[in-house]
Image (cartoon, helix red, strand yellow):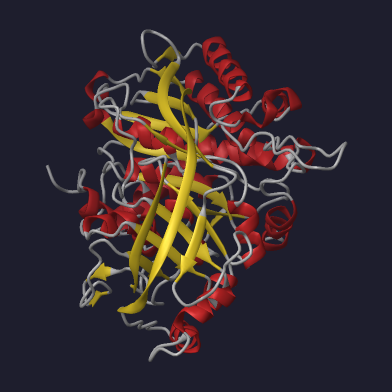
Amino acid sequence: MINRLSAGGLAIAASLAISLAAAAETVDREALERDTTILSADDMEGREAGTRGHERAAGYVAGRFAAMGLEPAGENGTYFQSVPMRRYTRAEVGNTIAIEGLGELEVFEDYIVSGTAQQESGTITAPLVFIGYGLDIEGRDDFAGVDLEGAVAIRTYGGPAGLNTEENAHLRSTLNQRLSDRGAIGVLLMHTPKLGQIYDWDRLVDISSHGSSMTWVGPDGVAYSSGPGILASGSLSPEVSRQLLEGLAFDYDDLAAAEATPEARLPSFALGRDVTIEFASTFEEIDTPNVIGMLPGNDPTVADEYVVLTAHLDHVGIQPTEEEGDDEIYNGALDNAVGVASMIEVARLLGEEPPRRPVLVIALTAEEKGLLGSSYNAAHPTVPAEQVVANVNLDMPVITYDFADVVAFGAERSNLYPHVVAATEAHGLTLSPDPQPEQGFFTRSDQYSYVRQGVPAVYLDLGFANGGEDAQGVVFDNHYHKPSDEVSLIDFAALERFVAVNHAIARNVANMEETPAWQPGDFFGETFGGRIAGEE
């Protein structure tokens, strides 16, 4: 992931590291503990977007912004940007899948299915078409030779070994757009051995079987979707996935074998059978706020170049259980109260000596619903869109141990990289490559929304050194999106160091002599546009 620096880049990093090492940096640990504890307390009710708990948390953050002297940068002279949302919740009945020739299938045992925000309920009957990974890239077209008009696509998870993992994650996240553009009306994910290495079927069902989904509604009143033609989506169990291909020239065992090869070449073909999908949701129109403050810069020559500092405020709320006395509040201390508390402290430190560029400090809503608060803000910023030049994001550092290395997702794709290197080196940290590239983290957090608007971004996470792999594994296995994600898990001494290095990154980026820009030839820069380093 991390490229070699040019000689010029090394010189920049060295000079910045010396400057930072000499700088006095005093992180307010007491404030970090207080903010994290308050934001993850039971009275915040899990901070689910669109609930009173999230509104309460947003009010608290706005108060902290005001106390620090950040200028209101939301709407109508306030700290709030209202994000109109459509919440769509799977109805208790009316969500079924029937596949020709497979007999009766049971929801949550054989399949998961739901509708989208485009239509509240309906039934579709369509031919099934297998499209492999749904890639359409140089040297590979998984749509060649198949007709998706009015069809339901069957896809698999993953991609060939040679494909850059961040780019592959982007291609996965935009699959519905490519399907919709080709006329598909639904999509189903097969559960294969490769997917099972990441999520077993029971875990996938658990993640998908409760809660609601959301999308934002634009000024035109239309619910946002990258694939508006897709009316229903779902997943098929390993057993049903096997049955679906049984007797065909390319069956489930062939699929598993092909996935295990580096090339992962999969054919595309019509399955010769139809599927009927019934979907039903309840729609609710709500508003949920982003909280936005602004720290003015000190250099009028770059007063129209905003660096955006972000962390998502929302979590997953309250999840009722049948057992009396269960803890039903998902407090989200690590995910992401600690990120918001860190962002507040970074903003305070920046305010002690404001950098050249102005900094927008944004506590984002609805990340857990699909990066929606950031997607809305990136598409509808409260400053002119062309003036947003960089994003520094903080999301769920698993800060439970004395970390020794960090991963800077996306940094090497732009001229932010030497400034990130300088910050990490100044704090005695190793900058490591992504230890879990198969997870596609770069497209799973809020920085991706700004990237899609052509804005270079960096997201700092913790690496696996000094016991990090085991420590992070404990959190993701036992506490992620569970009521046990409590403030008691956090190592606040380690958090002080994490905040210090994030402050250094944000300050370095905001003080850059050159305007933040993509490296020439970078995939995301070419895909989404934006400034290119070295070009006027």
Quadrant position of the N terminus in the picture: bottom left
Q: Is there any visible trace of residue 166 in the rendered image?
A: no
Q: Nearer the viewer, residue 528 or 111?
A: 111
- 226 left or right, relative to 41: left
| Residue at 42% in and 83% down | 262
User: Most extreme residue toward the left, as rendered?
Assistant: 536
Number of numbered tags placed on the structure image: 0
Q: Is there any visible trace of residue 79 in the rendered image?
A: yes
Q: Nearer the viewer, residue 211 or 402?
A: 211
Q: With respect to residue 412, does 20 lie above or below?
A: above
Q: Nearer the viewer, residue 248 or 43?
A: 248
The part of the image, by quadrant, that contains residue 451 is top left
User: Most extreme residue toward the right, as rendered?
Assistant: 325
Q: Position of residue 333 (x, y in %)?
A: 69, 37
| Residue at 73% in and 34% down | 329
Quadrant position of the C terminus in the picture: top left
| Residue at 21% in and 43% down | 530
Q: Position of residue 361 (x, y in %)?
A: 45, 25
Q: Position of residue 290 (x, y in %)?
A: 46, 24
Q: Position of residue 121 (x, y in %)?
A: 42, 43
- 185 left or right, relative to 1: left
